[in-house]
Image (cartoon, grey):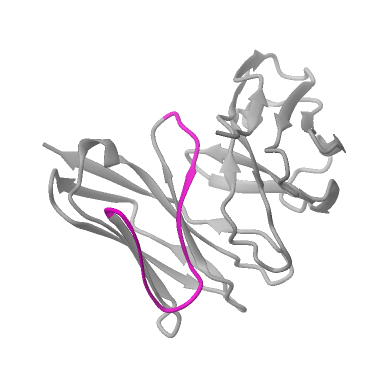
Amino acid sequence: DARVTQTPRHKVTEMGQEVTMRCQPILGHNTVFWYRQTMMQGLELLAYFRNRAPLDDSGMPKDRFSAEMPDATLATLKIQPSEPRDSAVYFCASGLVLGQKINQPQHFGDGTRLSIL
Amino acid sequence: GQSLEQPSEVTAVEGAIVQINCTYQTSGFYGLSWYQQHDGGAPTFLSYNGLDGLEETGRFSSFLSRSDSYGYLLLQELQMKDSASYFCAVRLHTGRRALTFGSGTRLQVQP
């Protein structure tokens, strides 16, 4: 079965450090999503791309977060500098979204569990 | 306004039937999706309702009433492995072509 692959699975680092999370979407999927999940806020959409173009990053703190998709097989989410409040599970998901049909199934990766000390 | 609400917790016994409700308020409706997430795992897609009525997939069914802005997920013949969180998701913001997930309903299946 095709899967979304995220690396690293776990990351522990000190505040102020740069964190880079990577995602390999399922081949053929045209849309990539980045989510953050915490107990308090639930599953929040940070950003998403369609055909590698950023469509929306309004859910992302712009001063420290950045999301890119350098090619069709790689999406990255960076935090610089990181802060303890960024501790969360970050999920990448991909899907084949055609037109307005945004309810096409999203396939999630296993997530990156990030702890900022 | 725009909102998405579902109960925080539901408990049921093995073999029983449980219904998880979801109500929404949104301008412009593009359907209701359901996802399952086990503790420590990733969300996985369960079902989608674009039109009114019932969609059935094995032991799981999902229902939508657009006139009532309401849907539910029905789980039958509950098994211990169904213990998980269940999220409904809709497109809440017309300007934002993406899903918003509810806060999730934690289902505990007891023996």
Farthest residue, direction front: A1
Residue A111 left/right relative to A49: left
Place of residue A10 in the rendered image (x, y in percent of width and height, measured from the top left) = 59, 18
Farthest residue, direction bottom: B67
**Is residue B41 positioned above or below A9 on the image?**
below
Residue A114 left/right relative to A81: left
**Is residue B62 positioned above or below A74 on the image?**
below
Place of residue A110 in the rendered image (x, y in percent of width and height, measured from the top left) = 55, 29
The residue closer to the viewer here, B52 or A61, is B52
- The quadrant the N terminus of chain B occupies is bottom right
Place of residue A78 in the rendered image (x, y in percent of width and height, measured from the top left) = 79, 30
Residue B55 left/right relative to A4: left
- The quadrant the C terminus of chain B occupies is top left
**Is residue A20 positioned above or below A71 on the image?**
above
**Is residue A71 positioned above or below A116 on the image?**
below
Q: Residue at x 53, y 37 (%)?
A: A38
Farthest residue, direction top: A13
Q: Residue at x 51, y 72 (%)?
A: B50
Place of residue A52 in the rendered image (x, y in percent of width and height, measured from the top left) = 84, 46
Residue B57, magenta (yes or no): yes
Q: Quadrant of residue B99?
A: bottom right
Give the residues in magenta. Answer: B40-59
Q: How many callouts does the rendering have?
A: 0
Q: Residue at x 61, y 36 (%)?
A: A91
Residue B69 left/right relative to B78: right
